[in-house]
Amino acid sequence: QVQLVESGGGLVQAGGSLRLSCAASGRTFSSGYMAWFRQAPKKEREFVAAITWSDRSTNADSVKGRFTITRDSAKNTVYLQMNSLKPEDNTVYYCAATWDKNYKVIPTTPTQYDYWGQGTQVTVSS
């Protein structure tokens, strides 16, 4: 059974940095896609960044130049390095994963992912 466990959220001042981690168990990262989404209250879940087993990655325009997604295959963990945080980044961040899909383009919508973590809160104070 696949489980995704996020960590690393917390309180940071605007302009600061945080690194989120997502540890996957139950499957290795081979042939997988992993991503970060975020969701504010009463809003739709929003794509942040995604990475493939072959290290292709993509970011949302709203975080380009500030957030970086990376992976450590040995630890079966994906990271989201968040720099220059803004008050509008203040929300819950979710890790997502799927495997064995032959997507031609890196998936960026929630319905393309099968497994989700419980979420981790990022609070950015102004």
Image (spheres, helix red, strand yellow):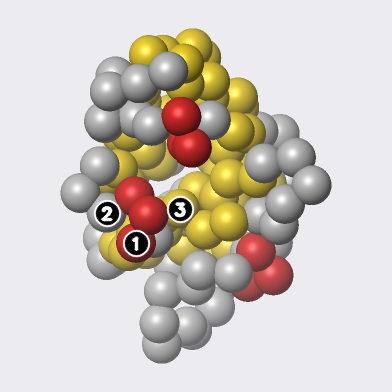
Q: CA distance from mark 2 to mark 1?
A: 5 Å
Residue 66 location in percent, x, y? 25, 42
Residue 106 vs 46, above or below: the answer is below
Point 53% across, 20% down: residue? 123
Q: Nearer the viewer, residue 63 or 21?
A: 63
- Of callouts 3 and 2, the N-terminal one: 3
User: In what quadrant of the picture does the C terminus appear?
Assistant: top left
Please state which amino acid type lies under the numbered disc 2. Lys
The alpha-carbon separation of the residues under discs 3 and 2 comes to: 9 Å
Q: Amino acid at mark 3?
A: Val
Q: Which residue has dot 2 on it?
A: 64
Say which residue label 3 marks.
48
In the drawing, does residue 50 fall left or right of residue 66?
A: right
The local crowd at label 3, few if under 14, some if 14 to 19, many if 20 or more residues have their Cα within 10 Å, is many
Helix, strand or loop at mark 1: helix
Q: Secondary structure at mark 2?
A: loop
The picture quadrant where one finds residue 112 is bottom right
Q: Is residue 109 above or below residue 97?
A: below
| Secondary-structure class at tag 3 | strand
The residue labelled by disc 1 is: 61
Q: Nearer the viewer, residue 45 or 117?
A: 45
Q: Please give the name of the residue rendered at 61% of the width and 27% of the height, measured from the top-left corner.
A: 120
In percent of the image, x 39 and y 60: which residue is there? 60
Mark 1: which amino acid? Asp
Q: Between tags 1 and 3, which lies in front?
A: 1
